[in-house]
Image (cartoon, rainbow, N blue to C red):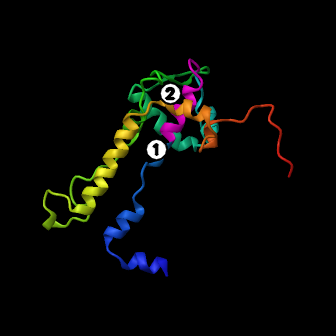
Amino acid sequence: MLRSFWTSRSSASIFLVKMKLLSDASEYALRATVWLSQRPGETHKLREIAEGTKATPGYLIKVLQSLARAGIFSTQRGSNGGFSLLRDPKTLTALEVINAVDPIQRIRTCPLGIESHGTCLCPMHRRIDDAMASIEQSFGDTTIAELIEENAQSRPLCDALMAPPATAEKPNA
């Protein structure tokens, strides 16, 4: 029933259902940046970063290369090579990381191609764009160091970023 409801609706409904806040590339970039920020001055291989962030190595390498091109990560070739964080987590914002790989998409024209909207957004799309602007501002106001500090003060939403202590006992099955 629900499926037929959405498939019978206009492309506006489809746009709203499929809209995703962050791309997979942005998510991977943030995870990798937080993970490397917790290991200052260290160089890590792709495999280590992929395991530590629960990311697919084949996709993650492209993200890491984009972060290196943006001057956020450095790369080192050779047997001791890998990736390390170049920027200070206290000044590096989440928005800078996101923009390095896949900037947040803002609505500039009617996503449905309705010519009568002209260059102005309709009220619905203007509200969506206003929400995206607020999200963009929030990421711009948030440093990587703040994300790490918040993780340390509470149980992380994403356990992939915080490995359990080596002495932790396994729960009884």
Residue in front for this viewpoint, 152 or 67: 152
Residue 115 is left or right of residue 57, and the answer is left
Residue 48 in picture, x, y percent from top left:
63, 32
* Residue in the picture at 56% in, 28% down: 36
Q: Is residue 142 magenta?
A: no
Label 2 sits on what residue type? Ala
Instruction: Classify mark 1: helix, strand or loop.
Output: helix
Q: Amino acid at mark 1?
A: Ala
Q: Residues within 10 Å of mark 2 (few under 14, many from 20)?
A: some
What residue is at 35 percent from the left and 64 percent from the top?
15
Magenta-span inclusion, residue 33:
yes
Side (left or right) of 105 relative to 49 = left
Answer few, some or many: residues within 10 Å of disc 1's Cα (few below 14, many 20 plus, some between 14 and 19): many
Which element carries disc 2, helix, strand or loop? helix
Q: CA distance from mark 1 to mark 2?
A: 20 Å
Q: Earlier in the sequence, mark 1 or mark 2?
A: 1
Does 48 sit above or below residue 122? Answer: above
Q: From which residue to which does the magenta span run?
A: 28-42
The residue wearing badge 1 is 25
Seen at 60% across and 44% down, the residue is: 158
Residue beneath disc 2:
145
Nearest-to-viewer mark from 1 and 2: 2
